[in-house]
Image (tube, rainbow, N blue to C red):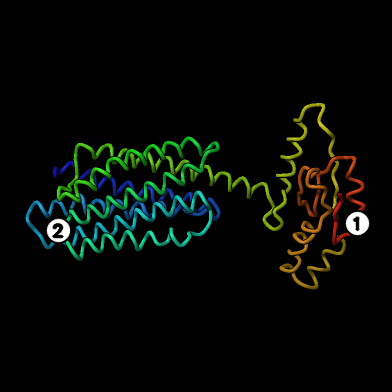
Amino acid sequence: MTTDFYNLLLSDCALALILLGLFWYVSRISRGLRGIALWGVAHLVYSLGASMLDGTAQEFARTGNAEATFWIAGIGGMLACAGLVGLGWSIVLFVQQRPLKGLELALMPLCVGLSLAGWVFWGTADAQGAAMSATEVVVLALMFMQLRQLDTPPDRLPAQLMMAGCVVLSLLYGRDLWNALTGNYGPNEAWVNIDLSTWYLLNFCMLMLTSFRAAESLRQSAMFDPLTGALNRRGLNAELGNFRRKPAGAKGLAVIALDLDHFKSINDRHGHQTGDLVPAAVLRCRPRLHPQRRPVCAARWRGVHRGAPRHRARRCASHGRTHPRTGHVA
């Protein structure tokens, strides 16, 4: 192994540390989106483990230090497998925006256990290389299947580039798996540029995807009232602006304004925490039009404003005033 190759692996770890900071920052501003920070952490762990296995352990093996090779390869292999599963988890969380399920959680003990078994029973770099390469192929297949679901703009293009990268890496790691199983595992300096460049592509595209989602999250928080989920003043103004840009032949618009009587007394008597529940409850009980005739929007502006087609607005408002609990207009 040349010095340039070893330095390249160390540079990859340094880049992974920088990417961790970027993904952490995007995660902070994305307001609760799943999977973003985990990608940065998992990629750093994977990069460290792969560098230990493909770099440091190989160097100790070349100098004949069997004990150091045993420990560095074992620890590096387990870190690499854990980081790879973390990357797979990150994609699942990001695409699905839900907690991990049982089979997905089982991937961590399965892959790390494979590396641990190779460490305990064989204790060679070939065994750890086989465990890491097998985990890479499995995780890349999982990532590919999840990324297929991002088929709408602006997610589609970076997701497709990531899918192409998964295919390229799967071919490389499939070859490494075969070499490890036949006792010929070792870093291929001729392929390392393709390997690292493809990971750069995956990280760049993942950063694009997370930035898109973070921007959408910020837009939602700027346009919607967090208490009721209705549009806020800015959101209502944007909707009205969209309505003004409709063709001249479009239907008109009516606005129903609901004013809560004696709302201050609720806050004074029961406290603001209880009072905050009232607007949300009103929005749930508001007059509802037939599902096929739903109004344009609902907004909170020191009350609730309900956009509705003009010829049904008066009947909707009257019914909501006389039947506040049911509030249904067919």
The number of callouts visible is: 2
227 is higher (above) or lower (below) than 253: below
Q: Circle 2 is placed at which residue position?
A: 69
Q: Position of residue 21 (x, y in %)?
A: 40, 51
For marks 2 and 1, the one nearer the N-term is 2
Q: Could you tell me which secondary element the residue under label 2 belongs to?
A: helix
Q: Position of residue 314 (x, y in %)?
A: 92, 46
Q: Circle 1 is placed at which residue position?
A: 321
Q: Quadrant of residue 131?
A: bottom left
Q: Position of residue 79 (x, y in %)?
A: 29, 58
Q: Residue at x 14, y 42 (%)?
A: 2
Mark 2 touches mark 1? (CB < 8 Å): no
252 is higher (above) or lower (below) than 74: above
Q: In the image, what residue type sits under mark 1? A: Arg
111 is higher (above) or lower (below) than 193: below
Q: Residue at x 85, y 56 (%)?
A: 327
Q: Position of residue 147 (x, y in %)?
A: 46, 43
Q: Quadrant of residue 271?
A: bottom right
Q: Is 67 displayed left or right of 146 in the figure? A: left
